[in-house]
Amino acid sequence: MKQTLNSALIFLLLLSVLQSCRKAGGLENPSIAPAQSEVPAAIAPANSLTAPKKLKKINLLNNTFATFQYNAAGRIYKVVHSSDSILYTYTSTTMTIRKYGRYSKELMSILKGKLNAKGCLMNLSGTEGNMTINVQYTYDAANRLVQRTGTYSDANTTVNSKAVYTWSNGDLVKETFYENNQLNYVNQYTYDLAKENKLNIMQAHNFWVDSFLGVPNKHLRTKYVMNAGSPGQFTVSEVWTLNAQGEPTLSKLTSSLPLPFGLKSLDYTYFY
């Protein structure tokens, strides 16, 4: 399905604009616990991340947007949003992602996958609502995610999806999406090559990731061209404020589409 202007607005409201090409969360109900074999394993992160400190919270317009917790190995363990929380658990060769309603405590989705020798997901499968998901990931020699293929099915429909990721200067510059072997849409990205990306976590494919989907972008992203070359094309620009250590503390997003409530920008504040 082609992206629409409504989905564009949702993108602007929900995108946490952390850098890279790639879900996360937390377990709110203490009576619901993962199987013992899936407790967070003290395995090393797949990549050496440049951030000297872990991101703990992001505010959107002075309200809490997401909070983050990490396991003993420094890997993402729990993320809490306003409406849901997601728990990540690991063994040395597997990973499980569970999403719960923050207040209902209902299990909304459970996805499981295998990790390669570098700690990156090779596949992910499970259910999300009424949908069955089966996804495979491919990396290049530099451990960059270069392709994602997947099947998404419900009682009535099956969609075969493919995404191809193009990199330049250590950054993801283009995403090309296909649906049932037809070109669906293209996203393009521009970066500030003078600003190193020191964020240790990012959002992609509707969830938060650390290094389990390959290396992150090397630089901070400054421009998004979504649905490039199509009638639904729109542009998002981003300006970053850094602290003395070069870590992002503020990002201001503006869009070629009108922002909600008459806002001129969406301001995200980062806490470590």
Image (cartoon, rainbow, N blue to C red):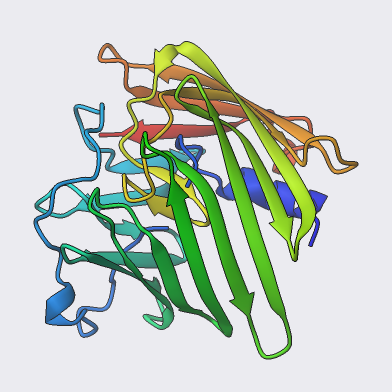
* Image quarter (top left, top right, bottom left or bottom right) of the C terminus: top left
Please say if 248 is above or below 183: above
Please say if 144 is above or below 113: above
The reply to whether residue 3 is in sight is no
* Image quarter (top left, top right, bottom left or bottom right) of the N terminus: bottom right
The reply to whether residue 44 is in sight is yes
**Which residue is pictured at 61% across the width and 46% down the height?**
164
Q: Nearer the viewer, residue 85 or 174?
A: 174
Q: Residue furthest right?
A: 231
Q: Position of residue 154 (x, y in %)?
A: 64, 85
Q: Is residue 126 left or right of residue 93?
A: right
**Which residue is pictured at 48% across the width and 12% down the height?**
193
Q: Nearer the viewer, residue 126 or 102?
A: 126
Please say if 45 is above or below 43: above
**Which residue is pictured at 65% across the width and 63% down the height?**
161
Q: Is residue 47 left or right of residue 19?
A: left
